[in-house]
Image (spheres, grey):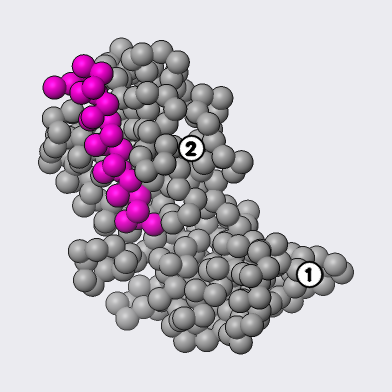
Amino acid sequence: MSHHKVIVIGTGPAGYTAALYASRANLAPLVFEGVQPGGQLTITTEVENYPGFKHGIAGPALMDEMREQVLRFGTEIKAETVLSANLGVQPFALSSDKGDYTCDALIIATGASARWLGLGRDEELSRSGGGVSACATCDGFFYRGKEIAVVGGGDTAVEEAVFLTKFASKVHLIHRRDRLRASKAMQDRALANEKIHPVWNQAVVEILTSVIETPLGDKIEKIRALKLQNTVDGSLSELPVTGLFVAIGHQPNTGLFAGQLPMDETGYLQVEKGSTRTPIAGVFACGDVQDHTYRQAITAAGSGCMAAIDAERWLVEAGLAE
């Protein structure tokens, strides 16, 4: 069994930043990549709102840069997925798909996964830059002057639809019912916006695409329309759009810690206000696994920094590090 002062689970902006700060504090962290190395940014084609890249940077490229940076400072990264964690013992015990490990301090940066429509094509097109996204703040800029759609009826969907009116010429807000679930204030704001067009009692059943050639000669599939089914009478129709934003929520990746750490009603880990500390001494959570409000790369990175500093201070106070 391999023992480490600090183990980080997850390699998104939060996990990598936690590893960076822990490495520079001479804590020699071990990082587990998990099933999605690099996190959600690996399915984001362009990132233009992360400081330091005046021309923007591809999501996977940004994650590669972070990975190389932490390796430079001595972080050990394993291409393994943690399958179980026992937080009731000290040191904490973890088992991956390839081995067993223990650690004095544990930093959880497992992130959250966007809920997709279950069509298969939606998630596939989000990875290929085909016009599907789960983050208006990240990708809205690319749809300036275009007609797009948002799927969902809660606060997140309505907020994203309103945000997208800054760029799009028209935003179709598609909902399965004849009324929104969002707060009244949010609904009033959206429905008063002349760019937002509610599409009631409709579900997206198929994403229709066409193949286009880029200026560099590459051929890629892009959305040309959505096939909709009326949830009342079952009739089918097509809605021409160039982009689709799926806003039906995120699922925090916290199943590993069920019954061991407190979570809110939607499964996000709960931490002490103003810190990354969980109720278990020596266990810290950062990034989207504990943040259902901002969910941005920069805020995740910031909380990863906090987690490493919190872990270092705890280790020193506990007499486990100098």
Q: Position of residue 275 (x, y in %)?
A: 35, 40
> Residue at left 55%, top 68%?
159
Task: Measure how far apart labels 2 and 1 are at the Cα level.
Answer: 34 Å
Label 1 is placed on what type of residue? Answer: Asp
Of the two numbered discs 2 and 1 in the rendering, the one whose residue sits closer to the viewer: 2
Q: Position of residue 110 (x, y in %)?
A: 42, 39
Q: Position of 182 compared to 287: left or right?
A: right
Main SS class of the magenta portion in the image: helix
Label 2 is placed on what type of residue? Answer: Gln
Q: Residues within 10 Å of mark 1 (few under 14, many from 20)?
A: some
Q: Position of 231 compared to 66: left or right?
A: right
Query: What residue would you read off at disc 2?
Result: 270
Q: Position of residue 107 (x, y in %)?
A: 34, 32
Kind of element beneath mark 1: loop
Magenta span of residues: 296-322
Q: Position of residue 75 (x, y in %)?
A: 19, 34
Q: Quadrant of the C terminus?
A: top left
In the rendered image, which quarter is residue 224 located in? bottom right
- Residue reaching furthest right? 233
Query: What residue would you read off at disc 1?
Result: 178
Q: Nearer the viewer, residue 208 or 265?
A: 265
Q: Considering only vertical position in the picture, is 175 above or below 103?
A: below
Q: Considering only vertical position in the picture, is 49 above or below 171?
A: above
Q: Is residue 196 magenta?
A: no
Kind of element beneath mark 2: loop
Specify the label residue 96 is tagged with.
none
> Residue at left 87%, top 69%?
233
Q: Quadrant of the N terminus?
A: top left
**Disc count in the image?**
2
> Residue at left 38%, top 17%?
93
Precedes in sequence: disc 2 or disc 1:
1
